[in-house]
Amino acid sequence: CGMRAAGMSKRPEVKPWILGIHAYVPGKSQSPEGRPLVKLSANENPLGTSEAALQARSAASSPADYPDPGSNALRAAIGELHGIDPARIVCGTGSDELLNLAAQAFAGPGDEVLFSRFSFSVYDIAARRCGATPVEAPDKDYATDVDALLTAVTDRTRVVFVANPNNPTGTYLSQSDIARLHAGLPAEVLLVVDQAYAEYLAPEEDDGGLALAAVHENVLVTRTFSKIYGLAGERIGWATGAPHLIDALNRIRGPFNVTISGQAAAIAAVADQAFVERSREHNRAELTRFTTAIEALGNHGLRPVPSKANFLLVLFEGDLTAERALGEIANAGYAVRHLPGQGLPHALRITIGRSGDMDEIIKVLRRLTGESA
Ligand code: PMP
């Protein structure tokens, strides 16, 4: 035995850049005592899913068959809705897959992948996965700072990720901000505009990402069916950009990366824009109401970060701490997101839920601040 000890200690060596990654930490959906909580922690649609999408999903063909590897009918449906040539679209296993593939295709060891502080946690993982160096530019009061991003660009920068609206802050860059960011980047740097929450914007708030991706060779826009379309569990995202970008992602994506039921559900969901409109309207009304309620607690140190998404980041800058609020909100039956690992120990990200759920959250916060009994 002793003689073989050295040999037995041999094992496959994990690449050092992989060991630098912290595995994604999901939000909790149970109370400390194990009670299930209503989830206002993952930015899911409180109205659920379009009825037509649910029907199409259950009518989809046999799971013994492989899905269409090209998601052709789904790309045609997305292309028609957005006025995009389907050849310029690629579908993914959630937009997560596409964000990772974008980093992998355009960055590697020695290269830098740039994004803002307080942006989507997957960008850091996507950079490290391919051995590139993640670089965080400073924020501007929780919002993406275009000037700080441009200042952080070096001759090693290969990919810039911008979430718009941004998760976890809900902040938003206008069309002129995005255009200025793009104009300030060298042509050989890929700008990824992650529009996971774009459908929550009013039409006049369009950030112009799709228009940039239609004409420039270095802009990729990603979208998802996980948020307003209520299909997070089916894992479907898409990206659009110049043919050489789409070609690169097609080379490295999973060949059968969107399931049969996912493709069927998403096609029906695209056709049901009335559901999207209802979801957007519900979110607009409840986000406004919730933001106003938090503002009213400003003298207790609560501060909403102005949001254009389907969640609100609430800062706790007074006596009431985010930890205490998190615990009391859980006692009331709700899971919300605390992100101390992302530099936000003093904040909670609360998904906009049903009206009654928002009433309950407001009630807890008013009670904790002594605004009501
Ligand atoms: N981008 C942003 C900004 C997100 O918040 C999310 C979901 N948390 C995603 C992308 C990924 O979503 P999915 O993989 O479900 O499409």
Image (tube, rainbow, N blue to C red):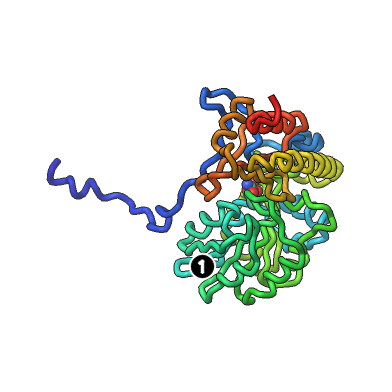
Residue 48 horizontal side relative to residue 107, left or right: right
- Residue at the disc numbered 1: 112
* Residue 296 visible to an observer of this rendering: yes
Residue 130 horizontal side relative to residue 322, left or right: left
* Residue 59 visible to an observer of this rendering: no
Q: Residue 148 versus residue 251: which sits nearer the camera?
A: 148
The residue positioned 58% from the left and 34% from the top of the image is: 326
The residue positioned 69% from the left and 43% from the top of the image is: 298
Q: Residue furthest right?
A: 274
The residue positioned 40% from the left and 53% from the top of the image is: 19
Whole-percent x, y for residue 327 in the image: 56, 31
Residue 311 horizontal side relative to residue 273, left or right: left
The residue positioned 79% from the left and 39% from the top of the image is: 289
User: SS of the residue at dot 1?
Assistant: strand
Amino acid under disc 1: Glu
Residue 151 horizontal side relative to residue 108, left or right: right
